Image (cartoon, helix red, strand yellow):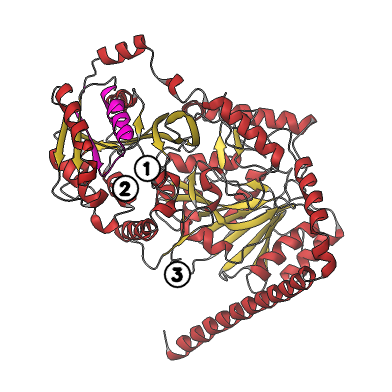
Amino acid sequence: MGETDYRGAYEQEHLKCADLAARVADLEAKNEELEWKLNRIKKNPLWKLSKPLRSGIHWMIRQKDRVANCGGPRGVLHKIEYKKREREAMKQFGTESFPSPEQAAAERAEVFPRMPKISILVPLWNNQKEFQIEMLDSVMNQTYENWELCLADGSDKDHAYIGEICRQYAEKSKGRVVYRKLEKNSGIAGNTNACLTMATGEFIGLLDQDDILHPSVLYEYVKAINEQDADYLYCDETTYKSGDINRMLTMHFKPDYSPDNLRANNYICHFSVFARELLDGSELFRPKFDGSQDHDMILRLTDNAKKVVHVPRLMYYWRSHAGSVASGIEAKPYAIEAAKGAVAEHLRKHGFEHFKIESTRAFETIFRIRYQVLGTPKISIVIANKDHVEDLRRCVTSISEKSTYDNYEIVIVENNSTTKEIKEYYTQLLGAPYEEDKDIQRSQDHRTAIVTFKGAFHYSAVNNLGVKYASGEYILLLNNDTEVITVNWMEELLMYAQREDVGAAGAKLYYGDKTIQHAGVVIGLGAHRTAGHTHYKQHRQNLGYMGRLCYAQNVTAVTGACLLVKKSLYEEVGGLDEGFAVSLNDVDFCLKLRKKGLLNVFTPFAELFHYESVSRGLDDNGEKAERYNRESEKFREKWKEELAAGDPYYNPNFSLDRSDYSLKI
């Protein structure tokens, strides 16, 4: 490349930066103007005086604004209904879930091919007497009996009764309870590492001194070790109060192993049991991450594990009391920085650089991770269209005016439009007369292409044709009835789609009333038992189940209304299956990616409006309903094994009839 070429490339980049800076400045100016107008309204005396009336009206609107088929989007009535369902479902997860004497005897008598010893580590420090006894009893009552309990006690002299209680249990345990009084307290990390030096088991389990185990948890884990060759296991958990495990505060029903979830949020937490060999000579807990030592450990050991298994039963009871982490992160503020440090070290280990980790509005230790976008690869935005000039204009205008990412092209796949207005708009986009008989026309700057699809509407075939003519390294499938909200939406999607372990990345989409249309797809959800959207019709500001609307996470599928994928992967899996003319082709596509061992990611930080189905209409009756039934049957047959196994990212304790994470009753 000569000097002139370098100068030309430099000037081009300089112009791009200048254009981007101008767009950002415009957006900031608009924001400033809106903020000024809003403040003027708020300071108006009449506005202040009318606040009680407005609050009452808004409350009434929220109660009315409910959705019949999938639970309400928001409001007190929906919350009351949800809590009522939760309380009803809760009954099956407390002491009622404990094995009967006959079942417990059968579990104790069962002989597995592998009967590994499980060493349960409990660091002790100034525990309350009743908490200590309840924890010890929950281990003694395990139906699987090849365990040992390793207790390292850093308590002070005022809590000498801890040692007395432990020695009593050691005597009656026939050597399975091992107790050591430490010379000094070394914190959770140090005391737990002391427990590890006492352990002789093939597997290691971690239990907090004031918590309780379900009597069958070790039995279920050993069963999974034998059936699935698991070397890292965890279960569902709940916090409880007042010493009664039936008085549950928050039940956490978890997804199966989800690497992106784990980076953003230590969702695995309790009750972790793992093969000792996973430590590979490293420390169990590292003092430099004290306060978030468990998150650091789980990130390291799941990395080493061959098979991480989630046992989808509520089997760990996390006591909430003053001073416990379960009662609030405020009890240990240093845990926040420790958690960020643990995640940062994990990311660097995986080759990521120049990332940023920020706390989210959900919780201080639930993180937004901003990955570096590598280079500026070209993105081809493929949009199927028939007439609906205003929808398409709104979509394209929002892309060009709001997007901070510059290296993209828009490929519009024209399909049987008849109106004069749309053809005039095509001419405007091309900067030249639109010619209907041409297979493809490109604008002079190659920013826009119009591809002609001849034949009846067929979503899969239309998009596959668009991809054929796309020149980008990445394909972004986008509906014509969308509108960009987040200015860096393409970067937010690209930071995931560019990873070698990721297939498709999808955005968070809203209806015009700012309720959620898409926040990830679950297979098996809904009346047809094919696929459905979670958090459907929840308000934009909703945190989601356990904060899930606040961090990027792994999902089985994302909607084709806004889906980014490498073009090479799109072609490798055969694009959209043309056996699905209109429905479920996007879910099928994501399942094909998952079958290749790739992750699909939903990020809430790429946001768009989706004025769903305004272009083609809803599939609710007549011929459209019949077609949907046919495609649903085809989907259920093609993916029957996956549907039978259940969505790995949606706990089987949740109802498949609702999208609001209601529990089965």
Q: How many residues crowd mark 1 within 10 Å: few (<14), some (14–19), many (20+)? A: some
Q: Which residue is mark 1?
A: 269
Question: Which label sits in the foreground, 3 or 1?
Answer: 1
Q: Residue 105, which numbered label?
A: none
Which numbered disc flags the more N-terminal residue, 3 or 2? 2
Residue closer to the observer: 55 or 270: 55
> Which residue type does callout 1 highlight?
Cys
Q: Within the image, what quadrant is residue 256 found in?
A: top left
> Which residue type does callout 2 highlight?
Asp
- Lateral position of residue 623 relative to residue 558, left or right: right
Seen at 65% across and 68% down, the residue is: 402
- Secondary structure beneath dot 2 equals helix
Part of the protein shown in magenta: 114-141
The image shows residue 312 at horizontal and vertical percentages of 42, 30
Q: CA distance from mark 3 to mark 2?
A: 35 Å
The image shows residue 382 at horizontal and vertical percentages of 63, 56
Q: Residue 375, which numbered label?
A: 3
Q: Within the image, what quadrant is residue 587 found in?
A: top right
Magenta stretch holds residue 129: yes
Residue 615 visible in image: no
Seen at 27% across and 41% down, the residue is: 305
The image shows residue 619 at horizontal and vertical percentages of 74, 36
Which numbered disc flags the more N-terminal residue, 1 or 2? 1
Magenta stretch holds residue 242: no
Seen at 25% across and 51% down, the residue is: 187
- Lateral position of residue 422 relative to residue 122, left or right: right
Locate the N terminus and report the quarter of the image it occupies: bottom left
Residue 157's place in the image compared with 103, above or below, is below
User: Mark 1 and mark 3 in contact (Cβ < 8 Å)?
Assistant: no
Residue closer to the observer: 547 or 575: 547
Q: Which residue is mark 2?
A: 294
